[in-house]
Amino acid sequence: MTGRQCQRLVQSVSSLDSDSYPADALEQRMASCAGGVSGPLSPPNSVQELISNPFERRSLGDKQLLKDLGPDQPDLNISQQAREKNKTYQRGFSRSWYTRKEWLTGCKQVNAVFCFPCLLFKQPGTDTMCPWTVTGVNYMKHLSEKIKKHECMKLHMTSTFKLAMLGKANIAAKLDQGYKISLKKHNEEVDKNRHVLSKIIDCVAFCGGFDLALRGHDETDTSDNPGVFRGLVNLLAPLDSVLEEHLETATVFKGTSKTVQNELLDCMLSVCKDYILEEVKNASYISIQADETTDISTHCQLVLVLRYIDPHNNVQERFFEFIPLQSANADTVATAVMEMLGTILPDGQQGKLIAQAYDGAAVMRGAKGGVQRKVKDVYSSAHYIHCYAHQLNLIMQQATSHIPKIRTFFSDLGGFAAFFSRSFKRTAILDQVVANRLPGTSKTRWNFHSRAVNTVYEHKENILRCFQTIRDSGDFDPITVREAGGFVRMMEDDVSSFFLTLFHKSMPHVDMLFSQLQKRNIDSVYITGLIKRFTSSIQTIRDSIPSGENSGSVQQLPTKRRGLGHEEQQLLAREVCDTILRDSPSPNTSSAPPSCKETCSSSTAEHSLKQRWKQLWKPTLDWTRQSSRRNCPSSMKMTSSGLAVVLLLCSSSLLTTISRRHSQRLSVF
């Protein structure tokens, strides 16, 4: 140790408090100084001491002592011979480098130079490749360039800054009171803005949760009807002083513009999609449901719904997105579906899609060129199932449209609501006499017909009296009187009364099955039993109709008669029941009851049964055979565990179909 360093040590020790630096340690350091380099202990600022006792483990007093001592700068005996261009050079280390670069420190044990600040503040594991802190630099060629390069390193600059600031007061502690006040005010402003934004988000979420339009025709501050969103914000403002103050004083960002509303909706959509995709990522299998729809602006779009089991083993059915379509052909729809599936199921996860459910349109269900075929070509496990609720609706439409008399009956029944909706004067008579409104009918939804039948049946006498009042009062125009008289004759007709009673008996069974098939958390076993009870109920209704002597088809009935005989009514009723029983989803192999032969020829019934068998059973039998050959997980084969996974994931129609098919597997094979 040089004399200058000993003088530094004495000054540092005398300035230190005994509490911060122990007396025995001070004595040892002083003894080391007195003994020089040959003493029993290495200098406290030597490279060997810094490596054996890292700087971060030392007390604050030791750290301050090392800073005051500075780097240890012993004489190094470095002599290297070099030869260049037939000339021999002798290189060595000069002490002048200590003066030129005060951060240099030397180590006699390894005969190399180190960086003193980097030795003090090096981070374990982060600078193992730096020779200035690990092995030292002992090769003197281009030493000046090595020193310049090290001085530009981030580690050296950070360590030098930390050494310079060691022992000085923290800058944050020296902040003046004005800065602290401004910082506190800024934080309060941030909290206030977050509170206001959270209230605005709540208003947007409320409108979305109840399918309410956000914007109105006039959203100015003076408007009497600014829209639902602005109305909610104005409602919350008096209840929240922070929000009220913001709306009154904000000049840059008020948060109620249409741009902010759209951005918030996009952010909510992004969050919801990320959440759904994360659940789908963790799910073992998923299924999709899709259907075309047209919005109010007549733009064609595809609704995509995902169905899967979440980590809590609950069946989830999530709406994912509206996909715009340029046209409604199979290629366009299939391309849109598969592009979205590519986002939902990345490469390598195509096997997770095990079902696709659409309606029965030819574009969707086509066996060769339909959407389901194109999707299945890419996702081989995605089996197509036609929605049973949709099938039931089509069956009821078929049962009520292919017989002219029944088609006329429902056409007249739909005119009841239309008759009263065209005049408030007629509606007043209806409210006065019947005290109940008549529901309208629909061409595509059977349950609207059901509501109309039940309402007319339950209030038949009052509705008849209402029509008679309108016809006989003399207060209405001739057209209204003529229409009311026609409805009176219809309700007094025996045929209409017979049809009204028939469909009133069968409606509750159809409505119950229809509602159960549309439930999200559906149980396949329960649905199978429900279908059995439905067919049994319809069969009971049919059997309660006595069979007449004439067992011909309805098309053979005389057409010139105004009314229908008792036998003809019975024949029509049996044909309706047979149509429902023949086409309705059944858990048994026989899709048509034996009694259908009374209204259909044997060849037609046999052909219908064969077509029904091919339609409903062949895809499942093929899937069963393929799953036994395919190298796939055992849980996906037709075992109990595999069936349980499939049943939970599929839609209501798929659940019932797979349950039916699997129940007959043993007998088929």
Image (spheres, grey):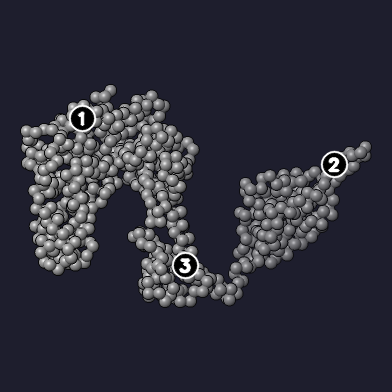
Depth check: 616 or 492 in front?
492
42 w.r.t. 164: above or below: above
Numbered tag placed on residue 80 in the rendering: 2
Depth check: 168 or 232 in front?
232
Q: Residue at x 31, y 28 (%)?
A: 618
- Mark 3 and mark 1 in contact (Cβ < 8 Å)? no
Label 1 or label 3, whichever lies nearer to me, is 1
Query: The N terminus lies in which quarter of the figure?
Result: bottom right
- Marks 1 and 3 sit apart, C-alpha to C-alpha, by 65 Å
x%, y% of residue 658? 29, 34
Q: Which residue is mark 3?
A: 257
Q: Residue at x 30, y 36 (%)?
A: 644
Label 3 or label 2, whichever lies nearer to me, is 3
Q: Which corner quadrant of the image does residue 87 belong to?
A: top right
What amino acid is found at the position of numbered circle 1 in the picture? Ala
Secondary structure under tag 3 reads: loop
What amino acid is found at the position of numbered circle 3 in the picture? Ser
Label 1 or label 2, whichever lies nearer to me, is 1
x%, y% of residue 282? 41, 43
Q: Which corner quadrant of the image does residue 12 belong to?
A: bottom right
Q: Which residue is mark 1?
A: 605
- Mark 2 Cα-neighbour bin, 10 Å: few <14, some 14–19, many ≥20: some
* Lower sequence index among marks 1 and 2: 2
Numbered tag placed on residue 309 in the rendering: none
Q: Is residue 354 left or right of residue 45?
A: left
